[in-house]
Image (cartoon, grey):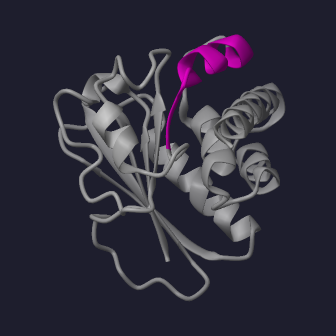
Amino acid sequence: MVEVRIHGRGGQGVVTAADLLAMAAFEDGHHAQAFPSFGSERMGAPVVSYCRISDEEIRSREPVLAPDLVVVQDPTLLPIMDVFSGLKPDGYALVNSTKPLSELGLTELEEKYQPGHVVAIPASDIAREHLGRPLPNAVLLGGASALTGIMSLDSVLSAIGGRFGGKVGASNQAAARAAYELVMEMKESHA
């Protein structure tokens, strides 16, 4: 079973990101579940969403405490909470930021994991370029597809197209594809 935890703030599409990830997993022929955990339910409040992907039926409804992948949609969460707690030793972390990992205070985390497993990409900037708004969720799913191979890019694009129609869907797909290509370039430079 692959477990994913997505951190962000209300209004950034954290819950939608987990739903899209689950839909992409279904597209790839897996069982999947997605569910959120949030408190105050206000715009800007910290939100966590979870996704599990398996080849067998998933019965657990517990929060994901030992994720294979952590996605951080808002880097302002880094100094206020341990978003990487429980990340498996062979896990992956994807952070939305224009800053390098060293400036985010993530050098130790990067050194603890295999090269290329902890990555920062400018997801909000990519979203702004393609959508006209800094919504990083679909962008980060494209990046996660390239980073981990957990789900195929085609399945991510299909899930996005199924959730959002027309121009919004096409713009989100283009943003996800741009992030996928960026992460693939980063992986090639680490090889």
Q: Give the x, y percent position of residue 125.
A: 59, 14
Residue displayed at 68% across by 69% down: 26
Q: Give the x, y percent position of residue 77.
A: 26, 29
Residue displayed at 18% across by 37% down: 81
Q: Give the x, y percent position of residue 176.
A: 71, 35
The reply, left or right, for residue 138 in relation to residue 182 is left
Quarter assignment of residue 87? bottom left
Q: Is residue 53 above or below residue 58?
A: above
Provide the residue span drawn in magenta: 118-131
Q: Nearer the viewer, residue 167 or 9?
A: 9
**What type of secondary structure mainly makes up the magenta span?**
helix
Q: Is residue 55 above or below residue 36?
A: below
Q: Quadrant of the C terminus?
A: top right
Residue displayed at 82% across by 31% down: 170
Q: Is residue 164 above or below residue 132?
A: below
Q: Nearer the viewer, residue 189 or 24?
A: 189
Quarter assignment of residue 19? bottom right
128 in the magenta segment: yes
Q: How many marks?
A: 0
Q: Is residue 119 above or below residue 155?
A: above
Residue displayed at 77% across by 56% down: 155
Q: Nearer the viewer, residue 29 or 37?
A: 29
Q: Give the x, y percent position of residue 76.
A: 29, 22
136 in the magenta segment: no
The reply, left or right, for residue 23 in relation to residue 94 is right
Quarter assignment of residue 178? top right
